[in-house]
């Protein structure tokens, strides 16, 4: 069983939350994806942001006891998926920057973390898409290309299943304010990182 969050708020530094990596014990792709998350954490702690306070957490329903132990040894606090979502939205109105690392998650999970992040940064209440994008300026997401989702939506390629648009479609609504940079191919294990991008919502994107 995964541990639960006992004090989910985190008001200082940066939160690095890795979701959907899977089981390191069972998958080479998962091991490579986790290694990349660890490199991100190392760069944030020891690079240009040397004095940064960083909390690293990860969650996936497939994690085994071995995965939990390895993650803990490497500085990643294991959470159950429900607690991870609670952690993301718990500090309502928080300005703590968040780096979401989500390689190859199902589309509904991207929609859920966008919704939870809006609650974190903007609180309750309805906002325009432009106001929502401004509220997400403290969020960086490494995950599936949103542009690819948008292209498939326009062509009607995926009408049902994990990649299909839902009733709520923040990926579509926020697209005009999105900055997306595709990551390069990784020929050593293409399936680990294909079609991944760095996604952000800079203030300047509204111009």
Image (cartoon, rainbow, N blue to C red):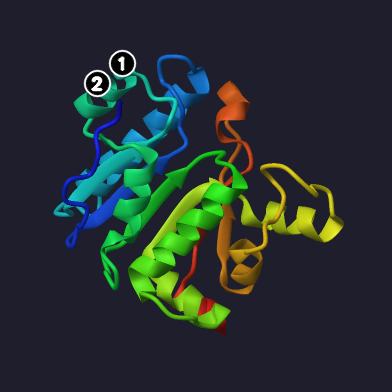
Q: Residue at x 64, y 63 (%)?
A: 169
Q: Is residue 115 left or right of residue 176?
A: left
Q: Is residue 49 left or right of residue 188?
A: left
- Which residue was labeled with disc 2? 69
Q: Secondary structure at mark 2?
A: helix
Between 183 and 87, which is closer to the camera in this rendering?
Answer: 87
Between 66 and 86, which is closer to the camera in this rendering?
Answer: 86
Q: Secondary structure at mark 1?
A: helix
Residue 70 image offset from top left, x and y in percent: 27, 21
- Please count the marks in the image: 2
Number of residues whose C-alpha sits closer than 10 Å to that of mark 2, classed few (under 14), some (14–19) or many (20 or more): some
In the displayed structure, would residue 75 be above or below residue 164?
Answer: above
Q: Are marks 2 and 1 in contact (CB under 8 Å)?
A: yes
Q: Is residue 114 left or right of residue 67?
A: right
Q: What is the distance, in whole Å, between disc 2 and disc 1 at their CAs?
A: 5 Å
Between 135 and 190, which is closer to the camera in this rendering?
Answer: 135
In the displayed structure, would residue 136 be above or below residue 147?
Answer: below
Q: Residue 97 falls in which quadrant of the image?
A: bottom left
Between 82 and 60, which is closer to the camera in this rendering?
Answer: 82
Locate the C terminus by quadrant: bottom right
């Amino acid at each position: 069983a995964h541990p639960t969050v006992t004090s989910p708020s985190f008001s200082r530094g940066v939160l690095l939350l890795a979701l959907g990596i899977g089981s390191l014990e069972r998958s080479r792709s998962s091991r490579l994806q986790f290694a990349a998350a660890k490199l991100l954490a190392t760069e944030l702690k020891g690079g240009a942001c040397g004095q940064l306070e960083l909390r690293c957490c990860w969650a996936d329903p497939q994690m085994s006891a071995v995965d939990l132990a390895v993650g803990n040894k490497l500085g990643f606090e294991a959470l159950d998926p429900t607690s991870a979502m609670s952690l993301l939205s718990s500090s309502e109105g928080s300005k703590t920057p968040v780096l979401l690392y989500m390689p190859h998650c199902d589309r509904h999970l991207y929609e859920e973390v966008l919704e939870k992040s809006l609650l974190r940064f903007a609180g309750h209440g309805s906002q325009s898409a432009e106001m929502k994008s401004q509220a997400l300026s403290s969020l960086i997401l490494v995950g599936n290309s949103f542009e690819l989702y948008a292209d498939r939506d326009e062509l009607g390629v995926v009408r049902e299943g994990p990649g299909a648009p839902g009733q709520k479609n923040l990926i579509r609504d926020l697209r005009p304010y999105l900055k997306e940079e595709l990551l390069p191919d990784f020929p050593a294990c293409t399936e680990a990182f294909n079609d991944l991008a760095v996604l952000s919502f800079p203030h300047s994107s509204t111009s």
